[in-house]
Every structure is written in C-alpha cells, then in structure tokens.
Image (spheres, grey):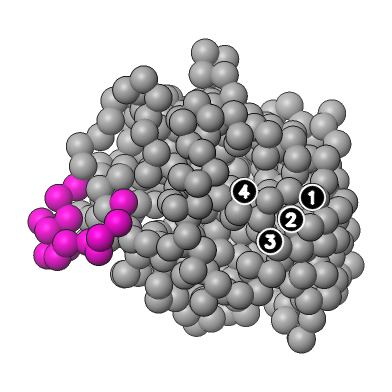
Amino acid sequence: MTELRVVRAHGDGMSRGRQIGAELSDLIQRSIEFYHRYLDRRGVSSSTLQDLLTPYLLATESAYPEGISVLKGMAVGAMVPVLELFAINAFEELEPLLEAPEGGLLFLQRKEGYTSAPAPVDPAQASGSTPPPGSPGSIPPPSRCSSLTISVPGTTLLAHNEHWLAGDLGNIAVVIDVPDGGRPAVVSPTVVCCLPAVGMNSRGGAQGIGSLTASDDQVGVPRVLVSRSSLEARDRADAIRRAAVTGRAGGYGHVYAFAGGDTFVVETTATQHRVHPEADVHTNHYIDPDLAAMAPAPSDGSRARFDRLTQLLEERRPTEPEGVMEILRDHNSSPQAICLHPDPAEGDEASAVMFSMVADVEAGRMWVAPGAPCEEDYVEIDLAELR
C-alpha cells in the first residue's frame, strides 16, 4: 500500500505555500529530480527554461498573483527553485514547445494514445484567424484524465482518474487548502508540485478536468492556474465564469458536480467555451463540434476511454461510491484503459494513473486511491474543514 499524505494549509498564499512545501519537501524534491532528468534528455537548460516560461509567468502574475504567492511559499518551504515549480504547473504549455526525443512522440501525445503524430490543425482554416506569435497552435491534444458524474435523487457523485508521467508515481498528496478572506476551502488530491486542480470545495462543488488543445492555444495563463480558480466555484454560473476567464493559454474539459444534482461539462479553448448540461463523461477530446473543428482528431486512446465510460454508465449506472470505484478500475478498453498502467518499455515517461478520486458532494465525503485503483485501496479523507 502506498502512503497517502494529507496536508492542511491555512492563511494567506505565502503562508499556505510554506506549509505545503515544508510538509511535502521530500516528495517535492524527488518530483523535481525527475523533471530535471526529463528536461536534461531534451537539452533544456535553466536559461532556456526561463526564456520559454517568462511570458506565461508574467500572464499568471497579472491574473492570479495569489497562485504565484502559493508557489513561492512552496519553493521556500521545500527549498527548491520557484521557476522549476512553475514549470511543472505549466507543463501542459511547456512540453509542446520542446523537441520530441530522437524524432519520437512527445509524452503528451503518447499518453493520449497516439502511435504516430497526428496531423496538425490549420489555424486559419479552423478559426478564420492566425494565432498570436509564440502560440503552440497546432500542437495535438495532451491526455490528462477521465472524469464522470452521476446524479440521482439524493446523491451527486464526481469521479476522476488522473493520468500523468510514471516518473511522478508516488509523489501524490491530498491538500486541504483553507485561504483567508472568506474564500472557500478546497480538498484536492494532487501531484505534489502542482496546485490543487481537482477535488471538492466548501460551497458544495466538485471538479474534474481533462486537458484539451485547439488551434487558438496561445501564451497566457497556464491551465492549472485556471483550474485552481475554478475549483472554488459556488454554482454553475460561477463555474462558467471562472473556467472561461480571459487570457488563458489553452483549454480544459471542466467536469462539475454541485450539491442538489447540478452536473455539467464546460469545454474551453484559449478563447472560446461551450457548456454541455447533459454531459456526464469527459476524456481528452472536444465533444462540441465547433470546438472539435479547431482541434486535431481525437486519439484512439481518448475515444476508447470515453466510449468505455459511456458504455459502463449505460450498463450499470451506479448510485453509490463503491460502484463508481469499480468503473475507475476498468481495464477493458484499448489502446488506453480507464485504469491506465505504465508501459515498462517507456520507462519513467510512460503514462499511468497517479491517483483516483470519488467525491460525494451531497454527503460531503471524498475517497482517494494513491495510484492505480485496481492496486491501491481508496482512503476516505476527513473533510472537517469543509463543514
């Protein structure tokens, strides 16, 4: 069994970051060592990293200064460089700017299920305009996760499997983040170097996310910073406002569940968004046809997970957390399973389930498995701060 650490942080951004960094310093340092190896393989020096990230950092400091304060506090608490922490939080923006090793696929392409690079989207054809200079524009979609919601009378559930780099396996914690100033507390399982992005808040809402890419991807606020804000949403209108904030670098599929049974998906690109009131499943491709026209064709991996989740909900729609956990343990889709295990041939750059989460927003309960849910038990998290 893998240990699941739970960190409670209270106060302003810097104070909370210091608490998180100090309590998770060994895991954060281990995680950063992995990313050093990852970047070294691609010949990325500190000066190159700074040049690549500075425009994203400036956009973030303007839009979400408190998020930067948390990262600075984490850097102090864990005794690591803040730019390296920011790089991991901006990985979905950074990685498409790097060269694939030895002419192969980028990690975010391979983990999405591609076996060869997908054809790029013509930005002018897709959107009628050319992306701003420096835009990643035609980069194919990264794969990050499978999410679903279930709403039946008296029960509203949100479930999420987080797919990421196998080199970060074990570097997982649950962060209970309680800001000053009357803002809602959030409880989030996360890779230790990253800000909370999925989980529950004290307003009775829960969020899962899945990365998306479109032809209007641009320099702007990294997706993780946007998702940290949208995790605090109080209701549908607030969720849409936060997910569709201007100045974002790219898109997510935000999957929401609110107490009272309101479940929906907000799909975003860097400049557009669509709301899907009836959607209860999302992976890593657009379901809105107009937004899909701005993106590369869905990979076989994302389609396989989406179709399998849809099939399982049709065959045996669960009404309790244990039934949802069984869906998250499923391996019967190819080339990617919902419960994704790393390919040993790909080493520490393979894709794998980092953690699995089930949230019952009516009961105010959360369960987290720190790794593949078929191998790790779900642990119930004490949500006293949310009550």
Please report the residue visible at 68 percent of the width from the left and 61 percent of the height from the top.
Answer: 71
Evaluate whether residue 302 shows in this view. Answer: no
Q: Residues within 10 Å of mark 1 (few under 14, many from 20)?
A: some
Cα distance between the residues tagged 4 and 3: 10 Å
Q: Which residues are magenta?
A: 121-136
Tell me if 89 is positioned left or right of 97 in this view.
right
SS class, disc 2: helix
Q: Most extreme residue toward the bottom, as rendered? A: 181
User: Quarter of the image holding residue 361?
Assistant: bottom right
* SS for callout 3: helix
Tag 2 residue: 75
Q: Which residue is mark 3?
A: 71
Mark-to-mark CA distance, 1 and 3: 12 Å
| Amino acid type indicated by mark 1 | Met
What is the distance, in whole Å, between disc 1 and disc 2 at their CAs? 5 Å
Magenta span contains residue 122: yes
Residue 50: image location, x then y, percent: 50, 52
Label 2 CA crowd tier, 10 Å (few <14, some 14–19, many 20+): many
- Disc 4 to disc 3: CB gap under 8 Å: no
Residue, disc 4 = 84
Quadrant of residue 107 within the rendered picture: top left
Say whether disc 4 or disc 2 marks the residue closer to the N-terminus: 2
Query: Are the residues at dot 3 and dot 2 in contact (C-beta closer than 8 Å)?
Result: yes
Mark toward the viewer: 4 or 3 = 4
Which residue is nearer to you in this view: 352 or 377? 352
**How far apart are the two marked residues, 4 and 2, measured between alpha carbons?**
9 Å
Question: For the residue marked with disc 3, what is the amino acid?
Answer: Leu
Q: Earlier in the sequence, mark 1 or mark 3?
A: 3
**Is residue 241 at all visible to an observer of this figure?**
yes
Q: Which residue, given by chain and number where applicable, does mark 1 sit on? A: 79
Given contact means CB atoms under 8 Å apart, are the residues at marks 4 and 1 in contact? Answer: no
Q: Residue 262: x, y in percent?
A: 56, 72
